Amino acid sequence: MRKLNSYFFSTLYALFGHNVLSKTNAVSLKKFFCISSVGAEGSLQQTASHQGVRSVQIPFKLDFGSNEHKCFTSMADVQKAWMYKEYGNFQQVLKLEQIDVPEIKPHEVLVKVHAAGLNPFDFKRGYGVIKSFDSPLPHVPGFDVAGVVVKVGSQVSKFKKGDEVYGDINGDIVEGQARQYGTLAQYTAVEEKLLALKPKNLSFVEAASLPLAILTAQEGLDRADLQEGQSLLVTGGAGGVGSLVIQLAKEVYGALVVAATASTKKLEFLKSIGADVAIDYTKENYDELPDKYDVVYDSIGDYPKSVKAVRDGGKVIEIAVFEVEPPAFSFRLVAKGENLEKLTPYIESGKVKPILDPKAPYKFSDVLEAFAYLETGRATGKVVIALIE
Ligand SMILES: NC(=O)c1ccc[n+]([C@@H]2O[C@H](COP(=O)([O-])OP(=O)(O)OC[C@H]3O[C@@H](n4cnc5c(N)ncnc54)[C@H](OP(=O)(O)O)[C@@H]3O)[C@@H](O)[C@H]2O)c1
């Protein structure tokens, strides 16, 4: 075995050169398949230092006299990922690490991440808000993904290798389904029922901006039973969820009047995405205005003020606070790929559009900067991380 090791390393040196192999960021090359002309079986378990090699397919020959060994690697099994090992502020606890590419279960697919959307819930979870029912640390944050399927589990029926998909990779988080390893990584494992085919007209960045926010908008409006011809007020209309509530209310549910709140500079933006009434919250208290609405979608946690804006018999959706009483109700999203599929025709026809914050996309190396911006609460539309390489 010692002789084999020494041949193994000399071959790697011949292939990559000393400089590459001596880099500190390790890529494990442990999945080698070796075929021997004398029928010897086995695989080499070695770690070589080579930054940047993600998918290696290197046939090479080890000559032991008359015995010939040909060895191949399939896919690197170590990847770059943002990870925190303790709860706290991401600026302190979130670090770029080298971790194993996740194994997939029978109903899961492995997705090569092309873009990942950020959500306030990423850093809230990082602070420990669902600690009592969260998966164990460490965590790779990230709910939203758009990418390409590179591996499918034995029970997967909906997707095949090469499919371009998107989705929110966490199912029912209250039921403990918040995943340990999220989408701020080169690869992520996802249950197939959480994914949908990426709408054809969207880039990966645009697709990654949608899942969690659009599913939250949709689930809230479904639960409130918003009907064609009704009126709706959205607080936080320029945010990730709010900007999609406005569009879905008008284009999917057929609301007659949609009003939304934002600060002065964002009023034109609200109108541009379909709001009929744009209320400047720095100048007016929406709850003191004479107009009352069939449904109020409060995305900023402005309860109980939000209840003052609903008409008698109407409903108030709360997504940022959870201790509320009727007519308000709150919920935590349970993401489903089939619900994304219901929205595909509206997205592919251009009726519902992804809204990217002007600063987006951020580079994978700039995840901390992106979270610092998101945490200001001033983002317009969605903050997305792109080109995860
Ligand atoms: N329950 C669930 O399942 C669920 C799902 C998704 C999200 N959420 C929660 O919902 C909240 C919103 O999420 P998000 O992704 O939409 O956040 P976001 O994108 O960070 O929201 C930012 C927007 O909020 C606006 N805003 C802040 N304060 C405002 C105010 N007083 N009045 C009107 N607009 C205001 C900002 O506009 P200005 O700059 O003009 O102030 C900004 O455009 C978060 O707390 C998130 O955790 C819950």
Image (cartoon, rainbow, N blue to C red):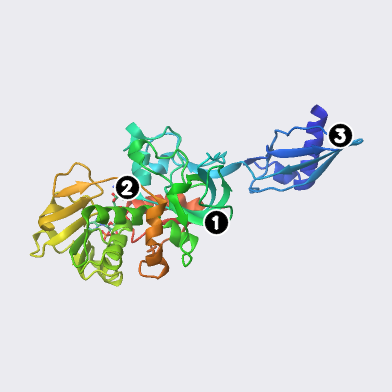
- Give the residue at x 52% y 55%: 147
Label 3: element kind: loop
Mark 3: few/some/many CA within 10 Å (<14, 14-19, 20+):
few
Q: Give amino acid for label 3.
A: Val
* The N terminus: image quadrant: top right
Q: CA distance from mark 3 to mark 1?
A: 40 Å
> Reading the chain from its start, which is encountered first: label 2 or label 3?
3
> Tags 2 and 3 in contact by the CB under 8 Å rule?
no
Query: Within 8 Å: ligand 1 and the Cβ of disc 2?
Result: yes
Q: Which residue is mark 2?
A: 333
Q: Provide residue 129's location: percent of width, then percent of height.
A: 31, 38
Q: Is residue 21 visible?
A: yes
Mark 2: few/some/many CA within 10 Å (<14, 14-19, 20+):
many
Q: Which quadrant holds residue 163?
A: bottom right
Give the label, 2 or 1, closer to the camera. 1
Q: Which residue is mark 3?
A: 38
Q: Give amino acid for label 1.
A: Asp
Instruction: Tell whether 363 sits left or right of 238.
Output: right
> Reading the chain from its start, which is encountered first: label 3 or label 1?
3
Q: CA distance from mark 2 to mark 1?
A: 25 Å
Label 1: element kind: loop
| Of the pair 379 and 69, the residue shown nearer to us | 69
Q: Which residue is mark 1?
A: 163
Q: Give amino acid for label 2.
A: Leu
Mark 1: few/some/many CA within 10 Å (<14, 14-19, 20+):
some
Q: Which quadrant holds residue 74?
A: top right
> Tags 2 and 1 in contact by the CB under 8 Å rule?
no
